[in-house]
Image: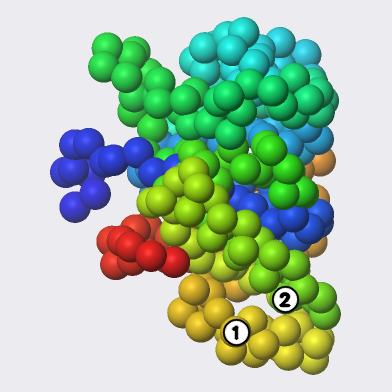
Amino acid sequence: SAAAETKRPLRILALANQKGGVGKTTTAINLGTALAAIGETVLVFDLDPQGNASTGLGIDRRQRRVSTYHVLAGDAPLAQAVIPTAVPRLSVAPSTMDLLGLELEMASSADRAHRLRNVLKDLNAPGSSTEAVSYVLIDCPPSLNLLTINALAAADAVLVPLQCEFFALEGLSQLLRTVEQVRGALNPRLTIQGIVLTMFDPRNNLSAQVVADVRGFMGEKVYETMIPRNVRVSEAPSHGKPVLLYDLKCAGSQAYLRLASEVIQREGRMPVAA
Ligand code: ADP
Ligand code: MG
């Protein structure tokens, strides 16, 4: 059983899509919570200057004295930024608007694409006092900028949230090309974990059409689980809570639990190329 396993390897997943508003942050918070609920130890690394993942996990601005900016700038060790959340086994490295300036600051440094990879190397170091992390979920900004490139260079796999809307596939090709380029130049082991359709509305014919198109285009890369459009999901962040704490029984919470088990299953059966 899962409980009998002693050490799971660390897996780093980047939640990426250069479009805003597609469900990256919502998925980072709630997939992270669902993974923690089924026994994984999870760190959400907030790589978006907006800091919505940090806020949604109940971390207010004053608690972000040491942020992912400081960690990536080399001003503080990762452990100093990590804050526990109300969810057992789920912690977050919060972000602030300072991250906006990091790209420029890093531009001329030789390790600019590998800052995050180097930072995450410190996780689970021998002798570290904290519980070993089994999943890092990186919440990327809505752009294919240097921050996102850092995430792709550090990750084992990319998880792409795709909103069920007319232009869903537009932009996906560009993201897939970027993943290909990063694999070639920076991170040969990078794979696509999967594509998760978000904000699915069964009453909307367009939603069903988008699902058919995306499944036709990406086949088995698309998770069976779709995240329904659900008002509880959108309310939860204003309470600083993952939806699983806010309303465990709602359709959104149940979908994120199913997604978590699909993510774990895929770790076993899709070891290589995207
Ligand atoms: P991104 O991080 O890609 O910009 P967000 O996760 O912030 O996207 O989601 C954009 C908006 O959509 C947020 O206001 C969020 O609360 C809302 N949202 C996300 N997923 C759902 C859902 N399944 N049902 C209803 N609202 C959702
Ligand atoms: Mg976001």
- Residue at image location 66% in from the left, 61% down from the top: 175
- Residue at image location 69% in from the left, 38% down from the top: 146
Determine crowd level at label 1: few under 14, some 14-19, many 20+ residues with C-alpha closer than 10 A.
few
> Is the residue at mark 1 in contact range of ligand 1, meaning its CB lies under 8 Å from it?
no
Residue 135 x/y as whole percent: 43, 41
Which image quadrant for residue 249? Answer: bottom right
Please give left or right for residue 252 compared with residue 116 in the image: right
Q: What element carries label 2?
A: loop
- Which amino acid, mark 2? Leu
Residue 90 in view here = no
Q: In this view, does 21 lie above or below 32?
A: below
Determine crowd level at label 2: few under 14, some 14-19, many 20+ residues with C-alpha closer than 10 A.
some
- Which amino acid, mark 1? Phe
Residue, disc 1: 217
Q: In this view, does 263 lie above or below 77?
A: below
Q: Is residue 53 above or below residue 168?
A: above
Residue 67 x/y as whole percent: 67, 18
Residue, disc 2: 169
